[in-house]
Image (cartoon, rainbow, N blue to C red):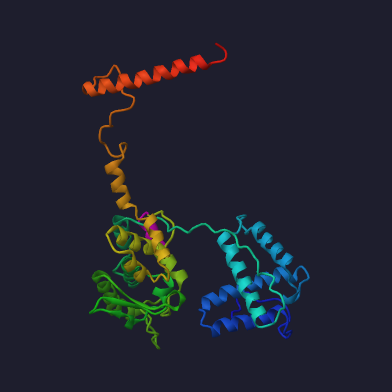
Amino acid sequence: MPAAHPVPGDPADPAGFAALVTDFCESLAVRGYSPATIDRYHVSLALFADWAVARGVEQPREVTRPIVERYQRSLFHLRRPDGRPLTFRSQTARLVALRAFYRWLARTHRVLINPTAELDLPTVGRWQPRSAMTVVEAEDTLAQPDVDTTEGLRDRAILEVFYSTGIRAAELAALRLYDLDNSRGTLAVNAGKGGRSRIIPIAERAVGWCEKWSLDGRPQLAVPPDNDRMFLNTRGGALTTKTLTAIARKHLDAAGIIKPGACHLFRHTAATLMLEGGADIRYIQAMLGHAELTTTQLYTHVAIGPLKAVHERCHPGAGNRPPRTPWPPNEAAPLGGRRDAADFQQWKGRVDALLAELEHDDPEN
């Protein structure tokens, strides 16, 4: 079971937080939850147990609905070391873990009443993808690594895979040599989020850089026994997501890209450019590995190329075209014809009549 944040209490107490959280995490593993999800739940429950034990609540069955509501308020007022509050998304993540824990306790008859049954979660704003790079910015970033060095060759191949496929950092870190099919131009992603594997296309240029890395660079870093990972660190081990983030951010900074993000910035860029290029959104969903189409549809708010074209074509203030005839037209300016003069006189007559009516209704006159 995860041990990133220990749960307070006596593990020998079958009704204590430590034993029940361990049993709950084990039940998640049996039901096929990913290790990352189990670890997040474990940490969230350990933090709640810390808060509860500090207030004299030693066992989960002692938790009541007012205690849960008080904990929710404490999350709202909690501040990070830098003074920033927890985001509503972070608050919701902790409360969702707590709710799942007590649902399991009630279902397995470890508690009589579920104190989270009527818990109202915070309203979380709709997540929006961050700004994507342009084609020029992406190409400038890809050109930054020094491909004459082993690390530079590896970095170029990594950036090419990110840009071509839009896969996540964790998915790239888990790639193995046999996941790339050079002849078909496909990449097998076997460590997708939620355990969803998929096969996606990869650009010919990215395949070429991966081949060059595998032949000229990787043998210089690999150490026996070979772990078959496609990309290695300087010690021959597997790359971590933290290392991949540092690699991507280093070359983005070198290219002068100040947009936030690192590995995910390439993911947003791949999705946005494909959408602007006319790709059907369902194909992009399959490429990114989204479980729900609604997640992919968020990229339609970033890919504003078609909307910008319509705006420039239809909005009178867009572009460098001369402005349309203002309304009301200037009486002293040359009029375009008899119809313009008639329109102006009609408008002036309506205004004069309105002013006369207002003067008549003025109580001071």
Lateral position of residue 247 relative to residue 13, left or right: left
Image quadrant occupied by the C terminus: top right
Query: What predominant SS class does the magenta segment belong to?
Result: helix
Q: Decide if residue 233 is in sight here.
A: no
| Place of residue 155 in the rendered image (x, y in percent of width and height, measured from the top left) | 35, 69
Q: Would you say residue 251 sits in the magenta stretch?
A: yes
In this rendered view, identify the residue nearer to me: 121 or 241. 121
Q: Which residues are magenta?
A: 249-256
The quadrant the N terminus occupies is bottom right
Residue 317 position within the rendered picture, expressed as x and y whole percent measured from the top left: 32, 36
Question: In front: 282, or 36?
Answer: 282
Considering only vertical position in the picture, is 107 above or below 159?
A: below
Residue at 70 percent across and 81 percent down: it is 110
Asked if residue 245 is positioned above or below residue 134 in the image, the reply reads below
Q: Residue at x 43, y 80 (%)?
A: 237
Q: Which residue shows up at 44% across the image and 65% down it?
A: 246
250 to the left or right of 329:
right
| Residue sitting at the far bottom | 225
Residue at the left extreme, as displayed: 337
Q: Quadrant of residue 167?
A: bottom left
Q: Position of residue 66 (x, y in %)?
A: 73, 65
| Residue 124 appears in the rendering | yes
Q: Position of residue 95 (x, y in %)?
A: 62, 67
Q: Residue furthest top?
A: 365
**Corner quadrant of residue 24:** bottom right
Quick check: 320 left or right of 231?
Answer: left
Question: What is the number of callouts on the image?
Answer: 0
| Camera-nearest residue between 145 and 160 | 160
Confirm whether the magenta stretch covers residue 198. no
